[in-house]
Image: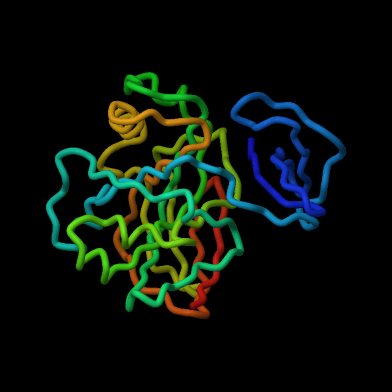
Amino acid sequence: MRFCRFSHKGHIHWGLLEGENIKPMSTLPFIETKFNGESIPLKEVKLLAPAEPSKIVCLGLNYADHAREFKLEVPEEPIIFIKPPTTVIGPEEEIIIPRSTKRVDYEAELAIVIGKEAYNVKEEKAFEYIFGYTCANDVTARDLQKKDVQWTRSKSFNTFCPLGPWIETDLDPSNLSIKLLLNGEIKQNSNTSNLIFKIPYIVAFISSIMTLFPGDVILTGTPSGVGPIKPGDIVEVVIDKIGTLKNTVKE
């Protein structure tokens, strides 16, 4: 099933996407599936980011080809960092390049959306805590990332975490095509089968450190081919069986 968060006539709702129509919900989808009112045509709504996370936990260097791209060793355990919720934007919204950086890069990623509170989750139970998956762009101020010892500043500017277009719940995430298109040209092209640390291990590892809440998001890492964006660019993250997350870039 595909769940989305959307704006319609000045009000924000969750809904179930069925073809070209959305069934509005009276509850959060993480809690229960209850509907409220008649279906609304998809073309009449504005899709919003399909999560309001308390935190976004991200993996660095989780594709071997991306590690080689930066001439870094493949990590022995996950490298994690956090993006604040103020980075989140939805489909068709603008990535804003801050004045304090001279280079901002795209990073296409598969995002996990947590469905129930998770702490010290065992790897074999991890999928029980996942609500679904969506597309993400881990936008990064690359020059600041190289300048700083840690990555917080480079990853945390407002608009630096586009998510969407919806959450797909009926999905095997182990073998999905993942691409990034910049102005229609493919720049990243890989598959989630190439993840170094797989989805169950990622959830178990992160939940051994911190409690994950419903709606929290995990970004699973980006493949090789990262590169810069500039004002006027159109950036699209395309993941098989989920859809396309499209954003524009401005200063």
Return the residue nearer the eye: 13 or 19.
13
- The colour scheme used to paint the residues is rainbow
Q: Is residue 20 left or right of residue 109?
A: right
121 up-or-down from 18: above or below: above
Return the residue nearer the eye: 242 or 84.
84
Q: Is residue 81 left or right of residue 251?
A: left
Q: Residue at x 40, y 41 (%)?
A: 218
Q: Position of residue 74 (x, y in %)?
A: 16, 48
For the N terminus, the quadrant is top right
Q: Is residue 73 left or right of residue 220?
A: left
Q: Residue at x 43, y 68 (%)?
A: 186
Q: Residue at x 49, y 70 (%)?
A: 96
Count of residue discs: 0
Return the residue nearer the eye: 171 or 233.
233
Q: Residue at x 35, y 58 (%)?
A: 155
Q: Position of residue 28 (x, y in %)?
A: 65, 32
Q: Position of residue 215 (x, y in %)?
A: 52, 36
Q: Position of residue 33 (x, y in %)?
A: 70, 26
